[in-house]
Image: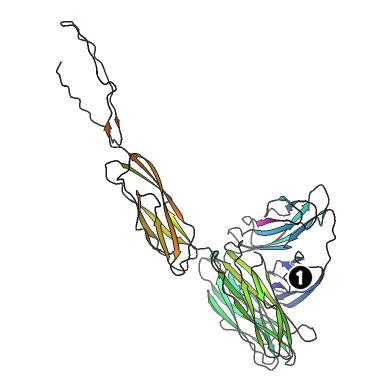
Amino acid sequence: MTNSGGGQISWQGATTQSWLMLSPRNGTFSSGQSIKVTIAADRSNLKPGAYAAGIIFMSTAGVAKLPVKMKTTPLQPGHEAVLQLTPAVLSFTAVDGGSNPPAQVLTVSNPGVQLLQWSASSSSNWLAITPQSGDVGKGGSQSVEIGVKTSALLPGTYSGVVTFTGIGPLPTRDSPQSIFVSLTITPQCTLQVTPGALSFSGVYLQPAPAAKNVNLDFTRGCGGPLRWNATTTTNNGGHWLHISSTSGTTPSRLVVSINEAGLKPGTYSGSIIYSYPAGTQTMPVTLMVGQSATPLMATTPASLTLSGIPGQPGPARQSITVTNAGGGTLNWKVSAATNFGGAWLSVDPAGGNLASHQSTMVNLTVSLLDGLTPNTYTGMVTITGTDSSGHPVPGGPQIIPVTFNVLVPCTITGAPSVLNFAGVVGQPDPPAQTATISASGTCLHTLNWKASTGNASWLTATPSSGSTSIKAAAATKIGIVLAGLSPNTYTGQVTITATDSVTNQSVGTPQIITVTLNIQPPCTLLAASAPQENFTSEVGANPAPASQSFTIGITGACKGDISITPTVTQRW
């Protein structure tokens, strides 16, 4: 794409079918600049046949549609391995100075009949591949992680290629193959605008379409809320685009409305320009005004954001309303696609028909797949419409971005994880030691905890139960009972478990505090090294017999120097 005019163009791209992919999906480029967008098809789950789809580019310079056709043919059986990769493109987004985004999984498959031996290499040093080679048997598959290293990169958009090649002794069909990767690094502090584009549908001489909401927030690198200003522009002239406020402080909600007065049937483009201390952002807005006798598609809401926690039930179903705001019959179809993380987004039903001024609901389901780690995942729902003759209708296609925030699960921590005690037989119990029980992650309610000592009867936890939360940690005293124990080294465990105080579901993994007790005997004088000493001497002999020596010692819990006083029973 090339900007042959003046100023900047902000754009977003979307596909009408899940098998059609592009990377990157959005961006900004200035006058005289060009940007390369890679378009690829994921044919892995498609049956042989002809397929048609499209790519819609919404921008501050207008809307452009790119039709795409593809034909898949049956795999002819042969005596060879076949290299198959999915997905065909990958997109990453990271924040300047932040941590690397999570790696994404690519699947290497072998629908052939021989062993597939493969290796992979990258065109850029910021790309990482794990593993870099492998073997895939007949009909099998292998997962490969593609990661990016952002520490040495400045804000901007980067493109790279990962090339897979068959390396076996026999030829490999469809080798080599390349996966195109885009990486967008945003500044540390930026204004978050959701959704990134708006589309309205109205009918000539009918009431204006419903207003839509835009959410404004800031990234973590800002250190605090952002002050913003907003202005509107329209490419076709007129003052049909209105916003509820021209300034504010994040987080904010802006209401965008349309005034169709004086507008004839057609497509109108405009934009909302947001400025903030670190820069500007431009949101494209499209208005389609249709004839009252033709179908006109409208949808709400403009975007969806959902949250989920691993190990918990997935978020509740959401609904998208599809309306025929015009006349005639609207034939509509809907599809869902995700940028990464697997097929966590689905919709039903897949399509239907709407008479004039009728509406229907599309159910949107987000699934907490096993492989989803805490992160922000993005996808989109694309709704297309045709009239009774099969021609595209005004107002379509509609692109609804979906954001899925997978949150850090609620966990408990018991600290310290190791405690040591020392005691002496016959002496008082050693002082108790404190263990802290704290909650972290996304804990929706207060947690109830319990501490058990198992079979270690000499080990105590006081109290043995209580509550804790993100804001207030709890504590228990770990104590020792020496009574009945002989000198030795003992090992026990304090196990701490927690449940949600509302749902009663288990939270996190049990925390183990290992306790070691070393018991010594009391300080005791050891027997002399010789049980007796014998002297022999003749009466009147001189000198006296030589002196003799013996040793004595101590054992047990003796502290410092020990005084020993011998006593003699005879003065000779």
Q: Nearer the viewer, residue 529 or 422?
A: 529
Q: Is residue 534 above or below residue 215?
A: above
Q: Is residue 533 above or below residue 227?
A: above
| Residue 436 left/right relative to 288 | left
Q: Nearer the viewer, residue 77 or 63?
A: 77
Residue, x 70% and y 59% (percent of image)?
106
Q: Secondary structure at mark 1?
A: loop
Residue hosting label 1: 2
Residue 422 in sight in this render: yes
Relative image position of residue 132 (x, y in whole percent): 70, 50
Q: Quadrant of the N terminus?
A: bottom right
Q: Nearer the viewer, residue 427 or 271?
A: 427
Q: Is residue 56 above or below residue 101?
A: below
Does the magenta-highlighted stretch encompass residue 41?
A: no
Q: How is the image coloured?
A: rainbow
What is the three-letter code of the residue carrying label 1? Answer: Thr
Magenta range is 138-161
Relative image position of residue 63 (x, y in whole percent): 73, 78
Residue 9 in sight in this render: no
